[in-house]
Amino acid sequence: MNHPTPPAAVSCQELTKTYGTGEAQVHALRSVTAGFAAGEFTAIMGPSGSGKSTLMHLLAGLDTPTSGSVCIEGNQLTGLNDKQLTKLRRDRLGFIFQSFNLVPTLTARENIELPLRLAGSKVDAGEIDRLASRLGIFERLAHLPHELSGGQQQRVAVARALISQPAVVFADEPTGALDLRTGRELLQSMQQAAHERNQTIIMVTHDPAAAAFADRTLILVDGQIAHDLRGANYEQIAAVMAEVGA
């Protein structure tokens, strides 16, 4: 008996993004169609200028496509006004940026609590403690960002993104500022969020070693999906990246 395929948590149809006009026009993304399942960890890779960051920004509703559509949990982003889009991002999406974006005057704990407080949700101190312990920052929760190392700041940013248990987490080069061991721990936490909490993780990275932690790797070339790899290891991903000139 065939079981129906569950609907994608995030999907896009014929997604296109162009900048400029006439001879100066640049096609950042060309008619990309893709789906991202609940509980799936996907890495997006590609050479510089391939459109990987553009794709993530469009999927997250941080930018508007020239044409095509994006759907998150059944919500067509093009049909939402600014207030509805802000609410969707606040309540259902999490973001991990390479630049951390921590509030400098708040402690690590207060930074992690921030999405819950903005949403008017209950702050579960025990859950924050458990998440911080898993990420190795429990002993640093009372410290301000400037008192933390780069790796510790990044892990606070990750905890902030995961604490509200968003349906979808977008991560832009999340291991870029981390040493090898800390980066591996972070990627394992993202794996755990996908597989144990059924969260959809979409990560842009240039690092085949980071992508090897994902269930699936999409490789973009010239604004289009050139490869869709599932269960690929470091060597396989690195070989394909070399093939496409990255």
Image (cartoon, rainbow, N blue to C red):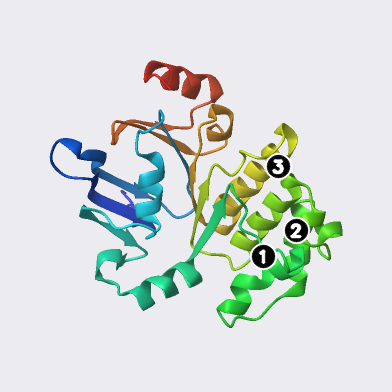
Query: Nearer the N terminus, badge 3 or badge 1?
Result: 1
Instruction: In this rendered view, identify the residue nearer to me: 157 or 91.
Output: 157
Q: Quadrant of residue 217?
A: top left
Residue carrying label 2 = 145
Whole-percent x, y for residue 195 in the image = 56, 50
Tag 3 near tag 1, CB within 8 Å: no
Mark 1 lies on a secondary structure that is loop
Tell me the kind of residue under disc 3.
Glu
On the image, the x and y values in percent for residue 66 come to 21, 53
Instruction: First in sequence, mark 3 or 2: give its number.
Output: 2
- Answer yes or no: do the residues labelled 2 and 1 have beta carbons within 8 Å? yes
Q: What's the residue type where badge 2 is placed? A: Pro
Q: CA distance from mark 2 to mark 1?
A: 8 Å
- Label 3, label 1: how many angstroms apart (C-alpha)? 24 Å
Depicted 203 relative to depicted 138: above or below: above
Note whether 195 is above or below 114 in the view shown: above
Amino acid found under the numbered disc labelled 1: Val
Q: Residue at x 61, y 75 (%)?
A: 116
Label 2 Cα neighbours within 10 Å, binned few <14 / some 14-19 / many ≥20: many
Q: Which residue is mark 3?
A: 185
